Structure formats: C-alpha cells, structure tokens
Amino acid sequence: MKVLVIGGNFAGSTAAMEIKRKLKDKVEVTLIDRSPDFLYIPSLIWVPTRRREVSQIVVPREKVLAKRGVDFVLDSALKVDTAANKVYTEKGVYDYDHLVIATGPKVNFDIAPGIKEHACYIGTPPGAMDTRAKLDEFKKNPGPIVIGATQSAGCMGAAYEFLFNVEKWLRTQNIRQKVDLYWVTPEPFLGHFGIEGMPFGEAIIKKFMEMFHIQYRTGVGIKEVTKDKVILSTGEEIASRFNMFMPPFVGVDFIANSPGLETGPNHFIPVLPSYRHQKLNNVWAAGLTVDVKPPFAQGEVPFTIPKTGYPSDVTGKIVAHNVINTILGKPEMEEKPWGKITGLCIMDAGEKEVIIFSNSLFKPRKIAIMIPNVFYDVFKLMLEKYFMWKLRNGLSYLP
C-alpha cells in the first residue's frame, strides 16, 4: 500500500509520520516537497527585525523523516491525475493508493495594483529577508509606515504581530518619533481575526494601539499602492515610505493544474469533515490547502478565516487517523470541521504577547479567553522551542 504526501510542513509531515508510525511495514509513505527544510513559519515575524535568523527556525527534513521510516523526495509536484492515481513532478511520476495534499497556499499578490512592487511580505524566508533589507534602508530616511491586510485576506494575526514588532524596532532604533505608524485591515473591528473576535478582544487591541500610538483604519481594502502612498478602498490616501501587507491565499499551482480535484476559483480542496475529498475516496487534504468557508456574513470589504499552524497540525493527525482506518478496513472516521478545532494562538506584540484560547475556533463557543501579557513574550518563545524540539525529533504524535 502506497501513501503519497504532497507538502511537508505542519500538516504534511505530521500526517506522513503518523501513518508510518502506526502502520509500519504495512505501508510505504513518501513525502514530496520542493524545500529540504521544515520551516517554523510563526517565527518569520522576527526575521526582519533580526530577533531571529532563518537558520534558527528551520529543520532539515530528510534525516528526521528517514528516522521515522518516511521516504523524502526533494521535488516540485506539478499535477495529479486522479483517475490514474499518479502524481507528476519535475523529476518523475509517482503512483499512490492514497494521496494526502498538504501543499500550503500560494499568495495572491495581484489583489491590488502595486502590492507586489511597493509592499513587503513576511510569509516566506526570502520575503522576510527582503523586508529586513527594506527596513535597514528605511531607517536611514524614516517616514510613515503602513502595515495591515488586504481585502480577501485571512492571515491578520501575523500582520498584527509584525506591526507591534516594528513599533518595538522603531523605538530600539531611536526613530519612533519620526514615524507615523498606520494599521489598515478589512476587519469590521480590531481583533476580529477572521473568527468574529474574542471576549474583550477589541478592547485589548485598542489599548495596544493607544499605548503604542498607532493610527488605524478598519473595514477598508487596498485600492492601490504606489512608491510613496497607500490608497484605501474609501479613497483615503496615506503617505508611506514603507509598507507590509498580508494578501489573500489561494491554492498552489499543483492544485490549479489538476482538474480532477474539482476545486473552486480559489483552488482549495473541498473536503468532508473527515478531510477526505468530497468526491474522491483516496484523496485527502490537510492544513492550509483545505477549503473553509467563513462563518460570518461579508461586509463591503471581504476577508476570510485564519489558517494557522495549530489547526494544520490537528488536521494532519485527523487525516492520518482516517487514512489508517481506511487501509485497515475500519469504517470509523474521525470528524472535526475546521471551525470546531480548538482555538490556540499566542500573538506576539513586540516582546509582549496576547494568549488566545477557545474550545472552538468559530462561534458558538463554550470557552473563549484572551489574556494580555505586557511584561514579556515568554509563552510565545516557549511555544517556538517546543515545536522546534518536536520537529527535530519527529515526534508527530505530540500535540
């Protein structure tokens, strides 16, 4: 029995190692990824301000996966023929009995004119390093900064984190007084996060904005970005010398080039609550590649839900469990829609943090708490150390 996993970060690595750990010699598990390293994406927010180097937040995949009995192939997947159960890559063709798609997203920089040319993006190592270089140049001639998320985006949390870390960096560089700092977001209120907010969440984020003297605009999109200003969907023009925006995510080219996956315009995978494809019994999806509909009504400026590392890891475990049961001929499927996964996030705020926990990512919730820690981001650092230790040792069964 052959299980083929496309994509090897949070969801893909977890699924591959769990399937192999539990089925052992009953299955061949192969993981294909175009990068040799696992990347702890949440810490990319610290790379532009030099709190982290990229080398500190990566783990080479091959040795860890080999230790757990998973074959690693460094390659780029191009498309899948779902009728023939074959995946085509740049270097070859791979057969499968079960296919797990955990490719992560592609970033839509074309959401507004000038985003690609005049705004930074921190969601990849090259993007984070480019942002570092732009900040180094910026401090020679400081001016207004605009940070936020575009229309249709969902990853507001990372943008908030970068905002507060840049504010901290400006103070350490002794140029804060020379910079007007702006936050722009499609959220109808601060702290919505694409999950309809948390108790006291708006008040907490507002307090941070007041404490750090950050101006903000909610319920807005980006009409255009030029070399010296940001034009909002309202028509307001904000002068700027540095910009960073989180654009929307869409499915990667591998999915878009595979019509048999029957995806919609965003090219995310339509799945059942078991994360099995809605129509293909031997195709599964985990992590950011899963199609998740926002549970809230859209306003004038659309935006969507967050897809972060914790639910990605959870969906990887669910997929592994269900693939294993299917191979063993057991009908029981674990089911947990994305919105019912536990909400767990520690939002960094420039050596401060906000701890967010709920029993369910989407409403209704029985438990929902949001606790600021204005002294030091100790829990954020502990979470990073835990995940890096877990990854280096291939301990996929741990939370």
Image: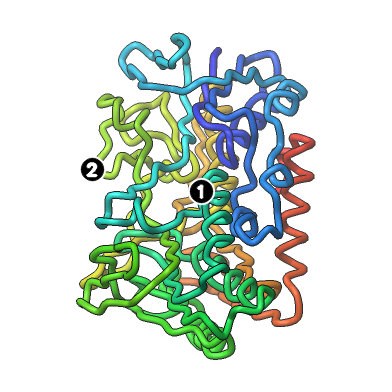
Q: Nearer the viewer, residue 311 or 58?
A: 58
Q: Earlier in the sequence, mark 2 or mark 1?
A: 1
On the image, numbered disc 1 is attached to which residue?
Answer: 127
- What's the residue at 66%, 79% (across, down)? 174
In the picture shown, does residue 47 fall above or below 168? above
Q: Position of residue 301 (x, y in %)?
A: 25, 69
Q: Tell how many labels.
A: 2
Query: Of helix, strand and loop, which one carries label 2?
Result: loop
Q: Position of residue 322 (x, y in %)?
A: 53, 34
In the picture shown, does residue 382 fall above or below 98? below
Task: Give the CA distance from mark 2 to mark 1.
Answer: 26 Å
Classify 10 Å Cα crowding around label 2: few (below 14), some (14-19), many (20 and above). few
Q: Quadrant of residue 278?
A: top left
Placement of the N terminus among the 4 image quadrants: top right
On the image, numbered disc 2 is attached to which residue?
Answer: 265
Classify 10 Å Cα crowding around label 1: few (below 14), some (14-19), many (20 and above). some
Colour scheme shown: rainbow
Q: Quadrant of residue 248?
A: bottom left
In the picture shown, does residue 303 fall above or below 7? below
**Mark toward the viewer: 2 or 1:** 1
Q: Nearer the viewer, residue 333 or 110?
A: 110
Which amino acid type is shown beneath numbered disc 1? Gly
Q: Nearer the viewer, residue 6 or 211?
A: 211
Q: Position of residue 332 (x, y in %)?
A: 52, 36
Q: Position of residue 333 (x, y in %)?
A: 50, 38
